[in-house]
Image (cartoon, grey):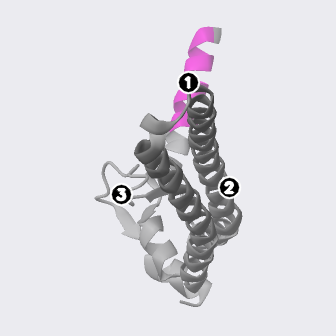
């Protein structure tokens, strides 16, 4: 009898809860397309390009110095005494190492800059998506942009791009 009561309670709970499962609302958005519409994104990309250009200019100067030393070495190598030749080889090798180190540091710095300027923009978009999802009572919102691509099926999902654009004033 006790077991029957427990089973009956579980069945009643499931019957009562069933309509809530059926009322789930799904939405989707292309977050990459949304970010491209945001004016802040274009400004951020220009800032990143300007930042990267500084590194590019310095890199080109280093390469010019390297090419000059390498060319000079190749032209005069056969006339050099071994001590001078070894010194020049060490100089060129050290310059190669510095160039490689510079490239690595530049990539790291550019990556940090990208994160620094893009994170607030991504956060703003995410906040707007969250607000629209709450306002429109969505249970789930999927991102169907090519970069993320977590949407597998969307028959009953609504595209919330227009609502999010309105929330952002775009």
Nearer the observer: mark 3 or 2; the answer is 2
Residue 47 at what x, y percent from top left?
Answer: 63, 77
Q: Are marks 3 and 1 in contact (CB under 8 Å)?
A: no
Element carrying mark 1? helix
Q: Which residue is mark 3?
A: 146
Q: Main secondary structure of the magenta part?
A: helix
Give residue 85's quadrant in the image. top right
Is 71 part of what is drawn in magenta? no
Q: Is residue 22 above or below residue 16?
A: below
Residue in the picture at 39% in, 68% down? 158
Tell me which numbered mark, 1 or 2, is placed earlier along the sequence: 1
How far apart marks 1 and 2 lie (CA) works out to 64 Å
Residue in the picture at 42% in, 66% down? 30
Query: In this view of the protein, which residue sits in the foreground, 134 or 7?
Result: 134
Query: In this view of the protein, which residue sits in the foreground, 79 or 151?
Result: 79
Element carrying mark 3? loop
Q: Which residue is mark 2?
A: 109
Mark 3: few/some/many CA within 10 Å (<14, 14-19, 20+): few
Q: Which residues are magenta?
A: 3-14
How far apart marks 3 and 1 lie (CA) works out to 48 Å
Element carrying mark 2? helix
Residue 42 at what x, y percent from top left?
Answer: 54, 81
Tell me which numbered mark, 3 or 2, is placed earlier along the sequence: 2
- Left/right of residue 55 with respect to residue 60 in the rendered view: right
Q: Are marks 1 and 2 in contact (CB under 8 Å)?
A: no
How far apart marks 3 and 2 lie (CA) works out to 26 Å
Q: Is residue 70 above or below residue 85?
A: below
Mark 1: few/some/many CA within 10 Å (<14, 14-19, 20+): few
């Amino acid at each position: 009898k006790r077991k029957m009561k427990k089973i009956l309670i579980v069945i009643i709970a499931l019957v009562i809860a069933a309509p809530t499962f059926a009322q789930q609302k799904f939405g989707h958005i292309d977050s990459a397309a949304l970010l491209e519409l945001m004016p802040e994104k274009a400004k951020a990309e220009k800032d990143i390009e300007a930042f990267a250009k500084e590194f590019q200019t310095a890199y080109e100067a280093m390469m010019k110095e390297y090419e000059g030393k390498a060319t000079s070495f190749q032209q005069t190598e056969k006339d050099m005494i071994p001590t001078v030749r070894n010194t020049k080889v060490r100089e060129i090798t050290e310059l190669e190492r510095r160039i490689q180190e510079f490239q690595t540091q530049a990539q790291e710095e550019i990556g940090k800059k990208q994160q620094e300027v893009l994170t607030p923009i991504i956060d703003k978009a995410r906040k707007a998506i969250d607000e629209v999802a709450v306002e429109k009572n969505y249970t789930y919102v999927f991102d169907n942009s090519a970069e993320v691509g977590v949407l597998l099926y969307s028959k009953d999902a609504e595209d919330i791009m227009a609502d999010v654009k309105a929330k952002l004033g775009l």
